[in-house]
Amino acid sequence: MSEIKKVAVIGGGTMGNGIAHVFAMNGYDVKLIETAQEFVDRAMNTIDKNLSRMVAKEKISEAEKEATLDRIQPHLTIPGAVLDADLIVEAVPESYELKKKIFTEVDLHAPEHAIIASNTSSISITKLAAVTKRPEKVIGMHFFNPVPVMKLVEVIDGLETEKQVTESIMQTSEKLGKVPVSANDSPGFVSNRVLMPMINEAIFCVYEGVADPEAVDNVMKMGMAHPMGPLRLADFIGLDVCLDILNVLYDGFKDPKYRPCPLLVKMVDAGKLGDKTGEGFFTY
Ligand code: 3HC
């Protein structure tokens, strides 16, 4: 398997800009694809800001920051950006239809040897692989927010993922300074299958009047040493994203233990999505 040198990241949102940031900081040439100039500008500004934070903390030098930014080339369309890529990482919102469209287009234009990875938090890798003519080269590369800080990359094999592809992505993750953990394709993989029921149960505690959000979070922060309580974390992830993932678990296993709490559904309906809307279980 040839060495991965050139990477295309599709999507410059919270996860996409973090993924572009860590690849570029570790010497990879990165093409960052967004749908409009304003989104590209926003992504590049966020990367600049997060790199400056690292300079201020003396984790990298100003020269390393500039070199990292120089390695990221923004693009507005997929074909030209993936033409010479060794690895494409898709990090667009959690819609199967949207990802299907992108996987089809990437498969058409990327070189034959290229690996196509998805940063999906719960959509089936096997199902995404099936829309391409290279299911053996499709894999899950699941990063965690904030990407420059969190150590884990959950590497998910689809039904047909080749062993060499898994090995290549595990090695690449290590080169990013991350710790890769391998899992098989299954609803929510490991991370969200364990995390989301905890978050959902925390919401049920509020819904049933067991305790208020602050008390629930304090229990988990001070009793279990979690850096953020589950409700603060839910706001940070996005309540809409939490609901989508719980629905994937619920539909995937047909098991009522994954049913989303009605309070979560109601908050998403009301547009209270957490940090990104300024209000969720807490206000920002
Ligand atoms: N880029 C670069 N550095 C960053 C950063 C960013 N975006 N965000 C934070 N940092 C750095 C800070 O500079 C600081 O560095 P230091 O340790 O050298 O001082 C360090 O991270 C800690 O940040 P802060 O001091 O500002 O704040 P906290 O100590 O409160 O930590 C946190 C913030 C790292 C977010 C911490 O609260 C945490 O670990 N929370 C849990 C996050 C988590 O669970 N993420 C996973 C979500 S699930 C997911 O993403 C998967 C999806 O499928 C749902």
Image (spheres, rainbow, N blue to C red):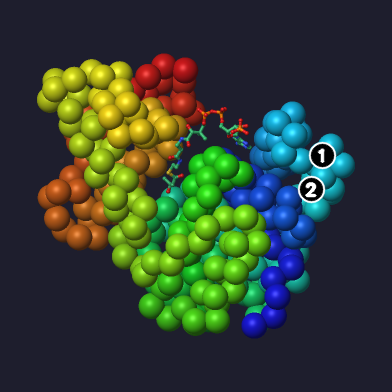
Q: Is residue 221 left or right of residue 167?
A: left
Residue 238, image quadrant: top left
Q: Which mark is residue 138?
A: none
Q: Which residue position holds label 1? A: 61
Q: Earlier in the sequence, mark 2 or mark 1?
A: 1
Q: Position of residue 66 (x, y in %)?
A: 84, 42
Residue 259, image quadrant: top left
Which amino acid type is marked by label 2? Thr
Q: Nearer the viewer, residue 195 or 237?
A: 195
Q: Residue at x 54, y 40 (%)?
A: 146
Instruction: Say if residue 77 shows up in the picture.
Output: no
Give how far apart the Cα atoms at labels 2 and 1 are: 11 Å
Q: Nearer the viewer, residue 206 or 104?
A: 206
Q: Position of residue 223 (x, y in %)?
A: 28, 29
Q: Residues within 10 Å of mark 2 (few under 14, many from 20)?
A: many
The answer to whether residue 220 is above or below residue 250 is above
Q: Which residue position holds label 2? A: 68
